[in-house]
Image (cartoon, rainbow, N blue to C red):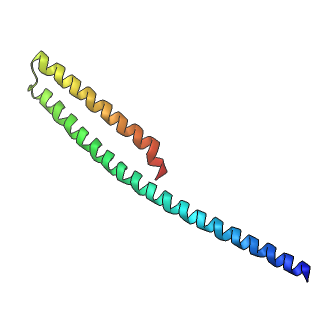
């Protein structure tokens, strides 16, 4: 009889552990789902930023091609702006490469 009680206690302990593990997994899943949602939101913002920067870059290129930036100073300002756009685009691409695989 004592052996049966020991087996029942062991089964009960295993069930309690499984319940605790299940609760922990549910909490982890909820946390990861929230983290994933946050990353997806940031990803959407970065994609929008990339599109905006691409449009600005195209406008700047068109302005240069149309002769709107003929002065040396205007050309220097355009070069600085283009360099800034390129840096921002590279940052967005790096972020996407580093975080896009998590979602």
Task: Give the camera-side residue of 22 and 44.
Answer: 22
Q: Residue at x 48, y 50 (%)?
A: 102
Q: Quadrant of residue 59?
A: top left
Q: Residue at x 11, y 24 (%)?
A: 69
Residue 60 pos. (x, y %): 17, 32
| Picture quarter with the N terminus | bottom right
Residue 53 pos. (x, y %): 25, 38
Task: Give the camera-side residue of 99 and 3.
Answer: 3
Q: Is residue 98 left or right of residue 65?
A: right
Q: Residue at x 80, y 75 (%)?
A: 9
Q: Quadrant of residue 79?
A: top left
Q: Residue at x 18, y 19 (%)?
A: 76
Task: Give the camera-side residue of 13 and 84.
Answer: 13
Q: How many marks?
A: 0
Q: Quadrant of residue 99?
A: top left
Q: Is residue 70 left or right of residue 30?
A: left
Residue 25 pos. (x, y %): 59, 63
**Residue 16 drawn above or below residue 102:** below
**Residue 58 drawn above or below residue 42:** above
* Most distant residue in the bottom direction: 1
Q: Is residue 19 left or right of residue 40?
A: right
* Most distant residue in the top direction: 72
């Amino acid at each position: 009889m004592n052996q049966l009680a020991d087996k029942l206690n062991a089964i009960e302990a295993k069930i309690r552990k499984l319940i605790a593990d299940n609760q922990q997994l549910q909490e982890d899943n909820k946390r990861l789902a929230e983290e994933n949602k946050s990353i997806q939101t940031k990803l959407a913002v970065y994609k929008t930023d990339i599109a905006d920067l691409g449009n600005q870059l195209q406008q700047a290129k068109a302005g240069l091609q149309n002769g709107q930036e003929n002065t040396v100073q205007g050309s220097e300002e355009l070069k600085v702006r283009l360099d800034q756009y390129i840096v921002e685009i590279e940052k967005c691409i790096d972020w996407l490469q580093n975080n896009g695989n998590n979602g």
